[in-house]
Amino acid sequence: MGLMEVENGASAGGDDVDADIIAKTCLLGGFSEANETRSILSSLPEVHGDQRTTEHVTQRFLVIMNGYQEQPHLLDPHLEWMMNMMLEYVRREDCPPSLLHLSFKFLYIICKVRSYKIFMQILPHEVSDVEPVLQMISRQDPKDLETWETRYMLLLWLSMTCLIPFDLSRLDGYLMSTGGKKEDLVMNRILAIAKSYLVVTDSPRDAASCLEQKRLSESTEAMLRKLNVKLIQRLGLTFLKPRLAAWRYQRGSRSLVANLSMSLQSSSGAAQTPQDSDEQEEDYDIPEELEAVIELLLIGLKDKETIVRWSAAKGIGRVTGRLPKELADEVVGSLLDCLSFQETDSAWHGGCLALAELGRRGLLLPSRLKDVVPLIVKSLTYDEKRGACSVGSNVRDAACYVCWSFARAYEPKELEPFVSQIASTLLITTVFDRNINCRRAASAAFQENVGRQGTFPHGIDIVTAADYFAVGNLNNCYLNISVFIAGFPEYTKCMIDHLTAMKINHWDCAIRELATKALHNLTPQAPDYMATTVLPQLLKMAGDTDLHSRHGAILACGEITHALYKVALQTNRYSYSGDFKRRVFKIKLMIILFFFFTVCSLIEKLSLSKLPLKNDPVLMRVLCAQAAVVSALSALCEGYYQDETDVLVSQYTEGLKSPQILTRCGSARALGCLPKVMIHNKLSQILEGLEQMCTITQKEGSFTEARRDAFYAVTFCVVRVCAKAGVCAHGRPDSVLCSENAAEVFGVLLSCLNDYTMSSRGDVGAWVREAAMTSLMELSILMQCVPHASVSRVKPLMCCLAQQAAEKIDRYRAHAIKVFLRLLHSTDPAIPHIPHREELLHIFPAETVASLNWKAPSEAFKYITQLLGLPEYQYHTLLGLSVSVGGITESTVHFSSQSLFDFLKGIQGDSETLGQFGDTLLRIFRDSLHNDRVSVPLLKMLNQLLNNSCFEIFTTQENHQFCVDILDLCKEFKKSKDISKLSACVSVFCGLIQFQGKVRKRVLSQLLLLLCHPFPVIRKTTANQMYEMLLTYDDIIDAEILEDVMTCLSDTNCDLAIVRTHRNQLCDWLEVPRPQLVAKVTVYHY
């Protein structure tokens, strides 16, 4: 026999259950406790010595701060003054340790609520703060478990002070202590502190990691290596006489006047030829040390840091400019060794930079161009795969710089033999490089060559089309600019060959797909070359072991075949050879198991190309894999299987009954992809199978994601079937959508709008609802020629759309509004029987709603809440708003509740309208009593409405029926074991206390029952909210006993027996009957 508490004979108990504590949502307008917080912080110097008072103050501060966990941004305007008050205490020279630790504890509480990333930004970080913070943290004991908040905040503070824009070595000053012992450097002290706290096991370790992330320990080796290279090159220059090499190549003069005078003397404009070095150069020995200098500079070209390589390249240029011709040529030969495939990408980059420097200085003679240009051409397309990506963009960028420098360094006649190679490779990089910087660098280099050399074919036209801004868009480069450039015969084949050799097998799937589309577009430029050379190469690549090559080759085969078919239609020239068909057949079986989606694209393109593949056994196997080949099925059936309709439709309708949910989804999608001629006379059979599958899946409780796919398939394919089969009011239900089957189809889709299936991934039913809304919109337009079909369907559809438009997920809310407005503003055809059409057109004028961002809660809800004023839409709109206002997303809660409050403020003076709103709210409450998706947010919304005095007109009447009904409905949850629901009920009860009459005593009785709830968190929540309630409403209890009641509610004792004693005392003070303890009789059966 046990004891339980009852009220008026009703049980208030419940079994124990393990339940997660779910934080409740609140909507606050600002930091309302600012004054109380200021007084608490001001009292710290007086209370820090009293442990009991300190605990009380700390607990109160925690309660205040925890109230802003969901809206921490409200604290932002107050963070600085709170922080300054506490830092003022800790900066005092006579600050006691207890006050210091208490201050940092309060700082940590604020930091935890607002997040350390935000809070640490306002911490002071002046130069004068570094040493005091270092001293304070040095005095802390890492093993003291009571003061870890102090160490945590000091480490955060130290990490901010390290960001001062000065070298920390300037803070060292005179490091001699009073005892004559030299102190450690500031940097060393900070590093030692960071290392010591990285090995602890408490929270300061996280702050220490934040300190380490400030890159204090980042090595300066790269800068040292750069300075080392600079020093070496300057030492090398001291071994050589300061002079300009007489053998260097010179193009013109730096002086404009000199250039003009030279052009008058000679129209040829030839460059000055280097004179004999034996005559011009003085005979002097080169020190042996210079060889070591050059060797170190060559090593610097291979450094892993760009700044070191760039410095070494400039050093190579400076030193080479003072060397004799023979030795300079040896340096060039060493540079060319850097551009070998045995070297790393760093060596290639450094080599290109050095060559560009030599060319710019005239130290790379034209005789060497035949060796240099082929390597530069390779560098322009350098791409070395590393794991899942590649390296080489810096090499390609440097190669573009080389081409740019060559254009300025050499006369046109010197580069004329290499124009074809340089121009074509630069254009390939311009349009096909994955990196935007490389594309723009190549475009600039090409433009420089066009302007200064004047020998690049069609240079002006190409520069105009492929300028700096045009090459910024990768899709535009592959699909448009490449076609324009390939229109010039000089560049056609090289571009096709590059795509085939390097982009079809690229590691990035997007590049492979773009390359295949580019080949499709380039096929009309060279159809013979594509058919006789490229396509056979791709067929071989389709059997390659590399998956990237195989994937790209298959896609390219389909694209080129389709493009050749288009060319054949225009020229009537092409036919498919037996060898080509045999190769296609050979690769099909091998690839079909690995690349379902790729094969789908191939089959679609081959079908559109009318390739004779009918009755091929491999394709028949593909027909059984419906889910993977839906995208290709329509073209395949229309091209080959129109005479086998019965077999295919029967096969797919049988698949709808399969126990495998994926087979059902694939079959449904396949039915939606069938061509119109195959649907004729089979529509009833298809619709019956789809409706049956929908009914079956609704009864299944498992396979949530598969059920979502099935519903999506139904909503997607039904409208496709109806759109293809057509609509006729008096037609045959076997062939068209008519008055006999329209209602069934519409009903199936409308039922999908109530799919709120939840899984570990969230509201997966939203995908079903989105597809259903699109399908219903299209179906509503199709059904306008069916008499009376829309009379009974438009109203529930518009109401359901209004509900979806008021819900919390931005994407689906915006989609619902767009469908709603599409039906409302539709004129061709116009949708009849829309309830309150004129009012809706006033709320949603066409010229205004088109420019709004419906995904933004700030713009959407102020329009949606106006539907509450239309009786036909009030229920569904308020149902959707309940989920939004009582949700957890901050922006959605804020703007939806604000819009709702604005609407209710406008009807406060109309008791009849407000009464209708209250009745609608009660009806939703009753309908959703056992639906947690709605009931919990509805309680939270109701709490906000009560706190904002939205029903103030009702509170003046005693025992108003609205309050009585709300109380009775909330009492239905008293046996619930859901923490969030019980907490929401407590909040609602505290809001109902403002109503007058006997109902107030009933509310107090419920609250007092919850004070002894089996769940401690509910007891604590009830006590806290009752405490706040009694402070807010001062007419509940006499002022003489108010202090005693508050003290009783503040008791933190968790013993249920003691709590029950206190509760009974509260009942006496509040003049509420004590709950009676009755025996719970256990019946034993023998």
Image (tube, rainbow, N blue to C red):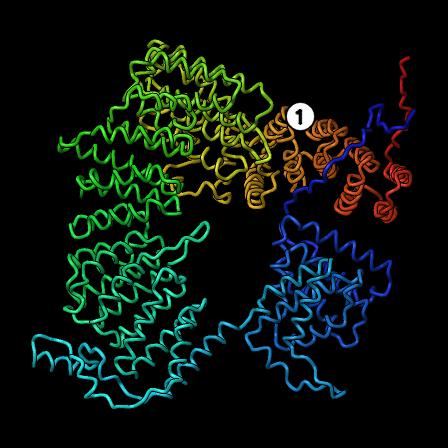
Q: Where, by quadrant of the figure, is residue 714 drawn?
A: top left
Q: Secondary structure at mark 1?
A: loop
Name the spot of residue 908 as percent of width and height, x first. 60, 37
Name the spot of residue 111 as percent of width and height, x first. 67, 58
What is the three-letter code of the residue carrying label 1?
His
Q: Where, by quadrant of the figure, is residue 233 drawn?
A: bottom left
Left-right relation of 360 to 777: left
Name the spot of residue 804 as percent of width and height, x first. 51, 31
Name the spot of residue 776 as percent of width and height, x first. 42, 24
Name the image quarter holding the C terminus. top right
* Callout 1 crowding tier (Cα within 10 Å): few <14, some 14–19, many ≥20: few
Residue nearest the viewer, comparing 636 with 498: 498
Residue nearest the viewer, comparing 893 with 328: 328
Q: In percent of the image, x 84 and y 48: which residue is there?
A: 1050
Visible in this render: residue 405? yes
Q: In percent of the image, x 85 and y 27: which residue is there?
A: 6
> Which residue is the site of mark 1?
930
Q: In percent of the image, x 66 and y 26: which residue is there?
A: 929
